[in-house]
Amino acid sequence: MAASPLAVAVGVTAALLSISSFAPQMIKIWRERDAQSVSLRMYVVTVTGFACWTLYGVLIRAWPVIASNLACLAMAAGVLAMKWRFSRHPA
């Protein structure tokens, strides 16, 4: 059964908002070369969650779930990588 145009529009909007929500944090960390205020634990949990959602999408063969969560995983992993790179006290 195909999704309604409204459902598709809501899904695309949700995916784009979720993906882009990491951009301001990434830009701030990169510009300031400082990630001390970023919670390491929170981003480890976030990256793990997006990895699980991506795997779930693969298991149920749902490409929208896979694509959106893979993109979110990449963005959150980018923040996490910068946390490790730029933190003075990585905890």
Image: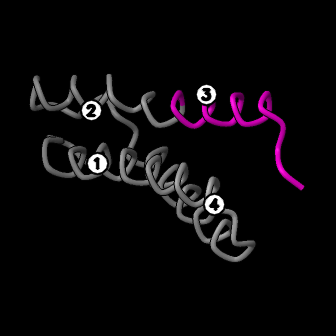
Q: Amino acid at mark 4?
A: Trp
Of callouts 4 and 1, which one flags the residue occurring earlier in the amino acid sequence? Answer: 4
Question: Is 57 rendered above or below residue 1?
Answer: below
* Residue type highlighted by circle 3: Thr
How much space separates mark 1 and mark 3, taking CA atoms?
22 Å
Residue type at mark 2: give it. Met
**Magenta-span inclusion, residue 75:** no
Q: Earlier in the sequence, mark 3 or mark 4?
A: 3
Name the spot of residue 26 as percent of width and height, x first: 26, 32
Please give the range of residues in magenta. Answer: 1-17
Q: Of callouts 2 and 3, which one flags the residue occurring earlier in the amino acid sequence?
A: 3
Q: Main secondary structure of the magenta part?
A: helix
Judged by depth in the image, the label closer to the viewer, 1 or 3, is: 3
Q: Are marks 3 and 4 in contact (CB under 8 Å)?
A: no
User: Residue 70: image x %, image y %?
Assistant: 48, 57
Where residue 50 sits, quadrant-wise, is bottom right
State the CA–CA distance, disc 2 to disc 3: 21 Å
Badge 1 marks a residue whose secondary structure is helix
Q: CA distance from mark 3 to mark 4?
A: 18 Å
- Kindly identify which numbered label has been placed on residue 53: 4
Direction from residue 15 to residue 22 in the image, left or right: left
Tell me how far mark 1 sits from mark 2, CA to CA. Answer: 7 Å
Query: Which badge, 1 or 2, comes first in the chain's sequence?
Result: 2
Mark 1 lies on residue: 78
Q: Position of residue 36 (x, y in %)?
A: 24, 33
Residue with the mark numbered 3: 13
Q: Compared with residue 86, is residue 70 higher up or lower down, i.e. above or below?
A: below
**Residue at (61%, 71%) from the top-left corner?**
55
